[in-house]
């Protein structure tokens, strides 16, 4: 799940940084969140889930692959998608 990098505290090393990866529980949370949204971007998904934008972009790619999201516009820096219609 989450990995912590040592640092922080005294000595001026900076804050503790938490790394997270795409896993099944994050995909399920994201799938539930996008159903309530009209338009989905990396930034909106990151804000909704409280994760980094780069991680949200990876989650969006997975949701598009699974058919949960439908791509409206895609560039190298931005993905705009909508929830896929129920059949």
Image (tube, rainbow, N blue to C red):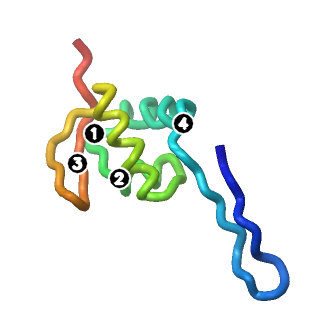
Circle 1 Cα neighbour tier, 10 Å, few/some/many (<14 / 14–19 / ≥20):
few
Q: Secondary structure at mark 2?
A: helix
Q: Element at badge 4? A: loop
The tag on residue 80 is: 3
* Residue under numbered circle 4: 23
Q: Earlier in the sequence, mark 4 or mark 3?
A: 4
Instruction: Report how far apart the C-alphas of labels 2 and 4 lie in the structure.
Output: 17 Å
Instruction: Identify which residue is drawn at 41% across, 42% down.
Output: 59
- Residue at 47% x, 48% y: name it: 48
Q: Nearer the viewer, mark 2 or mark 4?
A: 4
Q: Nearer the viewer, residue 81 or 77?
A: 77
Please tell me the numbered disc located at residue 14.
Answer: none
Q: Position of residue 79 (x, y in %)?
A: 24, 50
Q: Earlier in the sequence, mark 3 or mark 1?
A: 1
Q: Position of residue 62 (x, y in %)?
A: 37, 36
Point 30% across, 50% down: residue: 41
Q: Count residues near mark 4 (Cα–Cα under 10 Å), then give few for <14, some for 14-19, many for 20+.
A: few
Residue of label 2: 42
Looking at this view, is 83 or 66 the one in front?
66
How far is the residue under mark 4 from the one under mark 3?
22 Å
Image quadrant in which you'd find residue 6: bottom right
Q: Earlier in the sequence, mark 2 or mark 4?
A: 4
Residue 70 sits in quarter: top left
In three-dimensional space, the C-alpha distance between marks 3 and 1, rounded to whole angstroms, equals 11 Å
Query: Which residue has dot 1 on it?
Result: 38
């Amino acid at each position: 799940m989450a990995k912590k990098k040592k640092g922080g505290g005294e000595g001026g090393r900076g804050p503790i940084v938490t790394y997270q990866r795409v896993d099944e529980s994050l995909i399920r949370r994201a799938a539930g969140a996008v159903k309530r949204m009209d338009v989905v971007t990396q930034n909106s998904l990151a804000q909704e889930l409280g994760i980094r934008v780069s991680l949200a972009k990876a989650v969006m790619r997975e949701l598009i692959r699974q058919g949960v999201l439908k791509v409206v516009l895609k560039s190298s820096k931005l993905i705009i998608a909508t929830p896929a219609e129920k059949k």
